Amino acid sequence: MDVSQLLDASRRSYLGARARAPLGHRLAGCRYLGSGKVRDLYALDARHLLFVTSDRISAFDVVMDAGVPDKGRLLTHIAAWWFEQTRRLIDNHLVSTSVDDLPRASAEERALLRGRIMIVRRTAPTPVEWVVRGHLAGSGYKAYRETGRLFEHALPPGLTSGSPLPEPLLTPTTKSEGHDLPLDQAQARELVGAEVFERARRAALELFAGAARELEKRGILLADTKFEFGLLEGRLLLIDEVLTPDSSRFWPLAGHTPGRPQESWDKQILRDHLETLDWNKQPPPPPLPAALLERLRARYLELCLALTGGPPAGL
């Protein structure tokens, strides 16, 4: 597939199929390093990396074969907005989201990548995902149903799905391309060291509290999210992406009622659909209806506009 064909395909779903790769993993002036569930990673130089955010979407740690149109641009725009908003609390790795800062890229490559890239500083990532929960949902609610606790945290009886927690709680996990596993805070402290753990713990809780306040102004409830941190010359930086529909649960504040299914601005829509299927949550993934992909796109776009006030570049 040549570049012109890729450009045309990107209007529907950039790298929608898992097997497809951006520009065949060849990008002028960059060295391809690998791919995660959503992002493709390139080395720019000794100090900088390039993240390219695709339209791929995953659930239950399985990447779907079909992508959500424009998802990569929407995620990049949302993450960049949050990186700017949170810089007062903690510095981050973002340098630029402009394709003009890829001087060796061709015009076709820039058109394909517009709105999808983050040029970032290289850091040493901590081997922990710093999950903060303000409400019971997902694996947290499952743990509470089974044990009466939120992993290591004691909780009062009588809570249900969607119940607010007494306070936001940190429930760290391993960082893996497979299934992330819950860690207690002592295990996370052992993995990263006491000083880094305390800095990251404090930053994660402060970031969650600040984001929750900002979202409430827009009528949105932040149920839970995950943060990632890296070290650069001894400083802790916020890295990866932040507070997007891929890494967070966003619910409407108006009419929120615990114990009922929550309307959402995130990929819970996909999880709910998959739960109705006879699928063992292992590859290969089931096909997704076009209407579901468009619904996901619409919800991601709604959140993007509510937060940032405008669409991403290239949309």
Image (cartoon, rainbow, N blue to C red):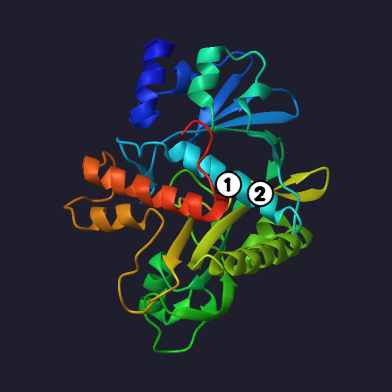
Q: Residue at x 42, y 82 (%)?
A: 148
Read off the residue under disc 1: 79
Question: Closest to the observer: 152 or 95?
Answer: 95
Alpha carbon separation for disc pair 1 and 2:
6 Å
195 to the left or right of 191: right
Read off the residue under disc 2: 83
On the image, the x and y values in percent for residue 129 come to: 57, 55
Q: Is residue 100 above or below residue 133?
A: above
On the image, the x and y values in percent for residue 23 come to: 46, 17
Task: Please identify the residue farthest to the right as the structure is shown.
Answer: 233
Circle 1 Cα neighbour tier, 10 Å, few/some/many (<14 / 14–19 / ≥20): many
On the image, the x and y values in percent for residue 160 come to: 37, 80
User: Which mark is on residue 222?
Assistant: none
Kindly identify the amino acid type of the residue bearing the numbered disc 1. Ala
Kindly identify the amino acid type of the residue bearing the numbered disc 2. Phe
Q: Is residue 142 above or below residue 308?
A: below
315 to the left or right of 20: right
Q: Residue at x 36, y 14 (%)?
A: 5
Question: Closest to the observer: 134 or 257?
Answer: 257
Task: Please identify the residue farthest to the left as the structure is shown.
Answer: 278
Q: Residue at x 56, y 68 (%)?
A: 217
Q: Residue at x 26, y 47 (%)?
A: 292
Task: Please identify the residue farthest to the front as the structure is shown.
Answer: 309
Q: Quadrant of residue 190?
A: bottom right
On the image, the x and y values in percent for residue 135 come to: 47, 73
Q: Secondary structure at mark 1?
A: helix
Give yes or no for contact between labels 1 and 2 (Cβ–Cβ under 8 Å): yes
